[in-house]
Image (cartoon, rainbow, N blue to C red):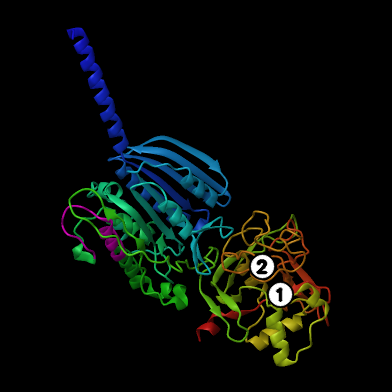
Amino acid sequence: MKPKHLYLSLILLILTFSGLFGTAAAADVQKVHALLICLGDDLKIRASVNVNEENMTDILLQVSENCNVDLTIMKSVKVGRGVVSKMTLSNATTLNPIDQKQGLITTRQVIDWLENLNPNEEDTVLVYYNGHGGVYGETHMLHFDGVKDLYNRNELSALLARKQARLKILITDTCKNQLDTPLPQANAYYAQVQEKNRSYTKHLFLQHSGMLDITAASTNQFALANNQLGGFFTAALIESFNEKSDMKGEGGIGNSDGFLSWEEVFAKCVWETQDLFSQSTSKFGAVLSSKLGERNQTTQTPEQFSLPSRSGGNSGSVTPGPTTDPPKLTDSFPNDSDGSVPSQHFNTMITWEKDGATMAHIPAGEFRMGVPTRKNARAPAYSIYVDAFYMDTHEVTLAQYEEFLKRTGHRPLPEETYADAPAPNYPVFNVTWDDAVAYAKWAGKRLPTEAEWEKAARGGFVGQKYPWGNNPPDGTQANLAGKDEYAKTAPVGHHLPNEYGLHDMLGNVWEWCADTNDPNNRVLRGNSWRERPRTAWLTERYLIRYPRRDLVGGAVGFRCVVDADEVQR
C-alpha cells in the first residue's frame, strides 16, 4: 500500500474508532430530568412553598456540577395564575430559562410531562410535589386547584416507576400549616442549603438505581411548616443531603465508607424532622396542642414506600427499604389566629352519635365577612371573630330527619318533599325555621349563626365569590341551575367539598341560620338548585317572614353545628 493511502486509511480508522467511542460515551452520559411542582396559590402557604422551591433548586444546581439537569418548575403564583419554567442547569449555572405564564397548574400537565419524557436508561427522573394533600376514602390525593383537580398519589408513583431510567424519585411534601412556627436556634441551621459535602449529591442522584418514594408524614399526622424554613420534612431532607455519610451518631445508620446512600439520608431525615417537631412543641406546645386537636400528635415521622439500591461509587450495596401502602392521611391544620387560611378538608372530623352526622372542625379566629356581591348590594366587608365549632359536612338528610320525626312525633314533612327528595341520602327541605331548631335541639346541636355559616362556607379564603374561589361553577362543586346532572336536589356529598370539608355550602337547598336579631324575619344562606351561578354568591342572604307554619315549595333545608368546647368535654 502506498504511504499516502496508508495515511488516509489510518486517519479513517482513527475517525471511525473515535466516532464509536464518542457514541458510546454519549450514550453513557447521565442526565437528571427534574420536575418541581410548587403549588403556592394559597396565599398562606406561599412563603413556605417558595422556600422549598428555592432550596430544591439549589440542590439541583449542586447536582449539575456532575451532570446536566433538565429542570421544569410548575408553580402556582396565586389563585388563577401559574408559571411553567424550563431551563438547563449545567456546572451550577442556569442556561436558557423560559417562563410561560398561564392559569392554574393542572394534573394533566404533570401527566403530560411524564408521558412525554424519554430518558436514557442511565438517567435519573425526579418529581417533587409541594402543596396541599389529603385522603378521599382510602386514597391519598394531591390537590391541584384547591380540591377541584385531584391526582392520586399512587397513580403518580406508578407512572413514574414505568419510566426507563436508572433512578426514579418521588418526594411529596403535602400539606402546610400557616401557623408561623418559630424554631429556637434552628432557623440559621436549616433555613438555607448547607455548603458542606457537596460531592455527596453525586452519590444520591447518579449512583443509585430503582425507586425512591417518600412522603412528609405518617398516617394521621400533620405535616408542619415554617415561613422562613419551609416544610419541616423538606428542610430535614435537604440537610440530610449534605450530611456526612456516617450517621450513626444521631439516630441514623451508616458504615463510614465515604458513600452517602438514600438509606442513610432517609434515616437522618426522619431524625431531623422529628427534631424540628420537638423544638416547636417544646416552645409552643400549648399553641400547637390546641391546633392539633384530638389527633394527639407527638411527632412527625416521614414515611418511605421504597428506597433505591446503590449502583455506583464504592463497593457494597444498600438493600432497598420495604415497600408499604401510601399513608392514609397527611393533612394540614387551620390557622386559628385569623381564620382566613384554607385548612385541608381532612382536618379534624368527628361523628356525632345522636344523628350519625360527620362534622368538620372550623377554627376560631377573625375573618372578613360580607364582601359585596354586586354594586351597592352590601355594606363593606368587616372583620368578625368566631369561636371554634364543628359543622355538619352536609345538609341534614331525609333519613336523618325522618329518624327525628320517628323519635319525637314532630309534625310530618309535606308530601311534596318526597317528590324532589327521592332517596334517604337527599337533603330534607320544606322545613320551617322552627322545624330546624327542633331537630337541632333533639340532636344536641344548634343552627349556625350567619357569621359561623359564612366563615365555614369560605373555607379559609378571603373575599371570594364561591366556596371554592372565584371561578364559575363547572358542575363538580355545586348544584346550581342545571350546572350538574341533577334537575333539582342532588344527594348530599355528591359535589366536591370546600377546604374545610363541607359539601354544598352553595346550591342544593337554602340553609337556615340561628340569628334572631330581626323578630319579623329569619335568615337563609347558601342558595338552592334554582339560583343561577352568576347571582348565587356565598354572600347572598334571603329573609323569610317569621313565623311560618309551612314552606311547601320552598327549597329550604339546614345543617347543624356544635361548639368545639362541647366536643372536648
Q: Are marks 2 and 1 in contact (CB under 8 Å)?
A: yes
Q: Is residue 328 visible?
A: yes
Residue 389 falls inside the magenta stretch: no
* Of callouts 2 and 1, the N-terminal one: 1
For the point 42% across and 41% down, the residue is 118
Looking at the rendered image, the quarter that the N terminus falls into is: top left
Figure quadrant of residue 379: bottom right
**Amino acid beneath label 2:** Asp
Spot occupied by residue 549 in the image (x, y as percentages of width and height)? 83, 83
Query: Is residue 151 depicted above or below 403 in this figure?
Result: above
Spot occupied by residue 187 in the image (x, y as percentages of width and height)? 32, 58
Q: 554 and 546: which one is in front?
A: 554
Spot occupied by residue 273 in the image (x, y as percentages of width and height)? 33, 64
Q: Nearer the viewer, mark 2 or mark 1?
A: 1
Q: Is residue 47 visible?
A: no
Magenta span covers which residues?
A: 252-271
Query: Is residue 243 depicted above or below 184 in this figure?
Result: above
Say which element carries label 2.
loop
**Amino acid beneath label 1:** Pro
| Number of the label disc, if any, that sits on residue 504 | 2
